[in-house]
Amino acid sequence: MKQFHNFINGEFVATAKTFPKRAPVDNRVIGAVHEAGPAQVDAAVAAARAALAGPWGKMSVVQRVELLYAVADEINRRFDDFLEAEMADTGKPKSLASHVDIPRGAANFKVFADIIKNVPTESFEMATPDGGKALSYALRTPIGVVGVVCPWNLPLLLMTWKVGPALACGNTVVVKPSEETPGTATLLGEVMNKVGVPKGVYNVVHGFGPGSAGEFLTRHPGVNAITFTGETRTGEAIMAAAAKGVRPVSFELGGKNAGIVFADADFEKAVAGITRSAFENCGQVCLGTERVYVQRPIFDKFVAALKAKAEALKVGPSEEPGVTLGPLISGEHKSKVLSYYEKARAEGAKVVTGGGTPSMPGTLAEGHWVQPTIWTGLPESSPVIQEEVFGPCCHIAPFDTEEEAIALANATNYGLATTVWTQNIGTAHRMAAAIEVGLCWINSWFLRDLRTAFGGSKASGIGREGGVHSLEFYTELRNVMVKL
Ligand code: NAD
């Protein structure tokens, strides 16, 4: 059976305590994950700290950049290994993992290598009280050991989105992947060794959150900064841990995103766009659309069209041709999603399609499958509309005016993303300015340029990463004043 070891100081480290990794497609045990205790987390943090003072810390930016290019190239060379690991852990369709997860995993190293190579720092000539001059300039210095705590929905993509810029800036990292997806983070250890990234620069500790590696890492006084992607509730716990020692945090948290479709939208494109944003990755995307608001004149037609699209999605295992929808990540998550399916029914929603589990053949029947589901008719106060379900489902409600659509979109604690569909350029820009989110897509969804700011407003996050914004988190500016 596959063993998922910790990766500490360039070595794969076994522990006495393991837990099973199960395949979401059929619930079969596919590996044993070696859970890091306090001793392993201590060792990982110590290795990361020592590496800061070693060859890594002494490297020029150009040398670091060359190593990060080599990491990206090696991920691409081992593309199939990463693809297989990601599909085994998540059950997501091959078409998705091969076009999104793995290419972005490699790109995250290349893009931030380019950014750190090209970013200027400030320099001012200033007048001094004695009538002379001084030069004041900034040195961009690493923040130190960064704790990286990751979710399971886009494991390699979201982990490297933090590790890429952290390493580009000269930091070292200790990564805690999700307990559900240990594969690609472990594999990345092999890549680091192969291309010659010094020992201790990249470390991985496996385990859970509270009372396990996640808590040990985020409470560890040797960690200088914490970057986290996951649920808002977990963010609260990590923020409390980070308060000790006043360590900075960067948080990408949950969402309850609105999709808004105006009557003047290109109908076919809007239906296709909302189909993707509601159901891609089986709805397990923080940026996904779980609340859809459609202008009244096209409401009935839109609901019928989205129903047809949802019913045409093909549910199945990763490598089956034509599959567009995989399983949910775990039995626990399936129970959570189905509890919302139940709540919707109990609150009197009209179930337009889905609402249960599909019947799957053979051993797949043990997997964590749920039907893509659409509801109408719930009050806006319903937990189904206010809480993040993180499954392949959405509720559709009608609206009449632009003002009403804005009010509906903003009536949630979250503020991560929105997608607006209209052909009126004025409407589009007014919506972008009025909806309280970090990301607003117009006539599109999930378009990302890694040089731009990414993050959430309200309960959806703290700070922005992407482009130079990542550098703001992963470095500190030291101001140097030189009397001339
Ligand atoms: P989660 O919060 O349950 O777990 C995320 C990670 O935190 C895991 O590695 C987990 O082991 C760890 N963890 C849990 N409790 C901890 C604690 N007390 N201390 C330290 N670590 C702890 O999230 P998840 O279920 O893995 O992921 C789904 C969530 O992530 C959704 O809410 C989704 O919206 C969010 N997400 C947000 C973004 C974004 O960019 N905003 C992207 C992807 C996912």
Image (cartoon, rainbow, N blue to C red):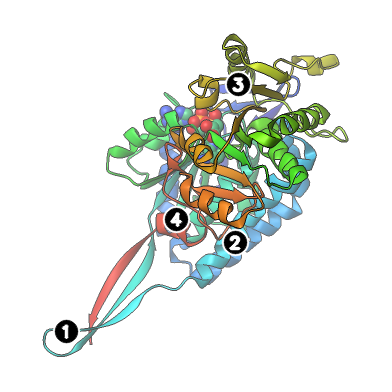
Q: Residue at x 57, y 23 (%)?
A: 18
Mark 2 Cα shell of 10 Å, populated few (<14), some (14-19), many (≥20): many
Dot 4 or dot 2, earlier in sequence: 2
Query: What element does badge 4 sit on?
Result: loop
Mark 3 Cα shell of 10 Å, populated few (<14), some (14-19), many (≥20): some
User: Looking at the image, is 331 positioned above or below residue 199?
Assistant: above
Please name the residue that numbered disc 3 is placed on: 333
Dot 1 or dot 4, earlier in sequence: 1
Q: Circles 1 and 3: CB distance less than 8 Å?
A: no
Dot 1 or dot 3, earlier in sequence: 1
Q: Residue furthest left?
A: 130
User: Looking at the image, is 373 positioned above or below residue 473?
Assistant: above
Q: Amino acid at mark 4?
A: Asn
Please name the residue that numbered disc 1 is placed on: 128
Please name the residue that numbered disc 2 is placed on: 111
Q: Position of residue 195 (x, y in %)?
A: 64, 58
Dot 1 or dot 2, earlier in sequence: 2
Label 3 CB less than 8 angstroms from ligand 1? yes
Please name the residue that numbered disc 4 is placed on: 171
Q: Residue at x 65, y 61 (%)?
A: 70
Q: Position of residue 399 (x, y in %)?
A: 58, 34
